[in-house]
Amino acid sequence: MPLMPDLPIELWSEIMRKVIFKKDLCQLRSVNSTFNILATPAVFYEIKVRNDDQSAERFWTLVHTSHIAQHVQSIVYVESTLRWQTYPYCCVVDGAN
């Protein structure tokens, strides 16, 4: 039995659209190359950038990764010293990209 059911790409795409949380989409990107391709647009549709060096470095990496940067539709700048949940760095730069 295959690990991933042999479904049409359109059905996988529709299933992917039902995933709500970006952290889940990030995990789906690491499953295989098909999931990576399907989840990437939703993961990187909106990017949040904080006013710290780590966030700026991740943003710089993202904008210089063309296959990811092409999906960014919104950039939100958050000026705050409070920590809020960010997406794992693997969502920006990983072996599956």
Image: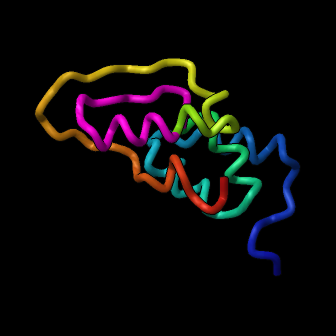
Instruction: Work out whether 46 lies above or below 15.
Output: above
Q: In front: 74, or 51?
A: 51
Q: Does the magenta stretch include residue 91?
A: no
Residue 19 image offset from top left, x and y in percent: 55, 43
Locate residue 9 relative to residue 44 in the image: left or right. right
The region drawn magenta spans 44-61
Residue 10 image offset from top left, x and y in percent: 83, 40
Question: What residue do we see at 27% from left, 43% from top?
Answer: 85
Locate residue 77 relative to residue 25 in the image: left or right. left
Instruction: Work out whether 77 lies above or below 86.
Output: above
Total labels drawn: 0
Point out the image quarter for the N terminus.
Answer: bottom right
Question: What residue do we see at 76% from left, 67% from top?
Answer: 4
- As drawn, the residue found furthest toward the left would be 81
Residue 71 image offset from top left, x and y in percent: 63, 28
Residue 53: name its quadrant.
top left
Q: In front: 82, or 34?
A: 82
Residue 80: name its quadrant.
top left
Instruction: Work out whether 76 lies above or below 68.
Output: above
Locate residue 89 relative to residue 70 in the image: left or right. left
Instruction: Work out whether 31 lies above or below 37.
Output: below
Question: What residue do we see at 88% from left, 49% from top?
Answer: 8
